[in-house]
Image: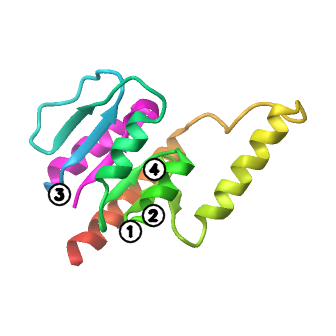
Amino acid sequence: MRIYIDADAFPNALRSIVFRAADRVQVPFVFVACQPMRLPTSPNVIFELVANAPDAADDWIADAAQVGDLVVTADLPLADRVIEKGACALDPRGECYSHDNIKERLAARDLMESLRDRGLIDGGPPAFNAKNAQVFANRLNQFLQKAAMS
């Protein structure tokens, strides 16, 4: 099992949570980004630098993810791709994506994008906060505990 982090937009507030988890459970956490980033030196924290091109990190993660892996991303099309491959997907705010809800989330995203493009609404999601970080930490721990029991 590996945990892939779509790192270009990954909240800094979650880094310490995943670094501690990587060392605690001895599972590889692979950060994938198109820009270099500083990560702690650990055999369980891996960095993959991809081309600075649209969707390069998403494509790399979608190709690498396998059944039983976890992908942490806010990118719904990427979540859909990895779910189709049998991996799990978790939003940095702690929402778990699955076959049961991903198509609905994609449709809602497309609708909101269309409304924004027409000027009917503006803005995006609320700012990331401590509650989001706690929900994410709880969901990550649930996934890791479940995986350890398998």
Quick one: which residue is furthest to the bottom in this view?
150
**Is residue 20 something that shows in the picture?**
yes
Residue identifier under label 4:
134
Q: Position of residue 148 (x, y in %)?
A: 21, 71
Tell me which segment is drawn in magenta: 1-24
Residues packed near mark 2 inside 10 Å, few (<14), some (14 to 19) or many (20 plus)? many
Near-viewer residue (149 or 74): 74
Residue 86 is labelled as 1
Mark 1 in CB contact with mark 3 (< 8 angstroms): no
Q: Position of residue 49 (x, y in %)?
A: 27, 29
Q: Residue at x 56, y 50 (%)?
A: 76
Mark 3 in CB contact with mark 4 (< 8 angstroms): no
Quadrant of the drawing holding the C terminus: bottom left
Q: In the image, which is nearer the foreground, mark 2 or mark 4?
A: 2
Mark 2 in CB contact with mark 1 (< 8 angstroms): yes
Q: Position of residue 56 (x, y in %)?
A: 40, 34
Q: In the image, which is nearer the foreground, mark 3 or mark 4?
A: 3
Q: Magenta part mainly helix, strand or loop?
A: helix
- Disc 3 marks a residue whose amino acid type is Val
Disc 4 is placed on an element classified as helix
